[in-house]
Amino acid sequence: MKLDHVGIAVHSIEEALRTYEHRLGFELHEIVAIDEQKVRVAVLPAGDSRIELLEPTAPDSPIQRFLEKRGEGVHHLCFQVEDIRRKIEELRSASLQLISMTSDTGLEGRKIAFLHPTSTHGVLIEL
């Protein structure tokens, strides 16, 4: 598995970009809305991986619930896998709890799945 990105929950992409672009020196690649996930995503390349700033687009967005509970900060780590369906089956066989048993669609139309943080020492992991 390869680290694909780190997802960071933010209240406002525009405000967060003042820090990530202007102070830290990252360059914005694009901002995309993912309606299915109720989120806007700002993509910032970071070497062989990237940072994704996640802004909720609806009150019932998972990112909005995260922000209300924990505030801004690291939301998840994402690892790229070759065959997500096979990986999901492997993880289920290893008794890791998945948030959804089928893969959803994420950025760039990729199939995604999430491991529950209780299975991974408090870290939400996206595949």
Image (cartoon, rainbow, N blue to C red):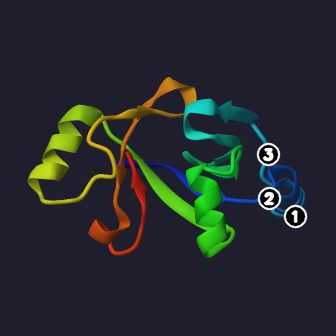
- C-alpha separation, residue under disc 2 versus residue under disc 3: 8 Å
Write the residue at 22% across / 41% down: 87
Q: Which residue does the image show at 69% across and 33% down from the upper left?
A: 33
Residue 98, horizontal then vertical, whole percent: 28, 52
Task: Give the residue at the far top of this rendering.
Answer: 109
**What is the secondary structure assignment of the residue under circle 3?**
loop
Above or below — where is 3 with respect to 75? above
Q: Is residue 79 left or right of residue 88?
A: right
In the picture provided, is 47 more to the left or to the right than 14?
left
Residue type at mark 3: give it: Glu
Residue 74: quarter of image: bottom right
Q: How many marks?
A: 3
Residue 58 spot, x, y in % from top left: 69, 45
Q: Which residue is mark 3?
A: 27
Which quadrant holds the C terminus?
A: top left
**Dot 1 amino acid type:** Arg
Q: Marks 1/3: CA distance?
A: 11 Å
Q: In the rendered image, which residue does mark 2 sit on?
A: 20
Crowding at dot 2, Cα within 10 Å, few <14 / some 14-19 / many 20+, comes out as some
Q: Which residue is mark 1?
A: 23
- Residue nearest the viewer, comparing 75 with 58: 58
Q: Callout 3 environment at 10 Å: few (<14), some (14 to 19), or many (20+)?
A: some
- Residue found at the very far left of the displayed protein: 93
* Residue 102 % position (x, y): 29, 35
Q: Position of residue 93 (x, y in %)?
A: 9, 51
SS label for mark 1? helix
Vertical order, 85 against 120 (above or below): above
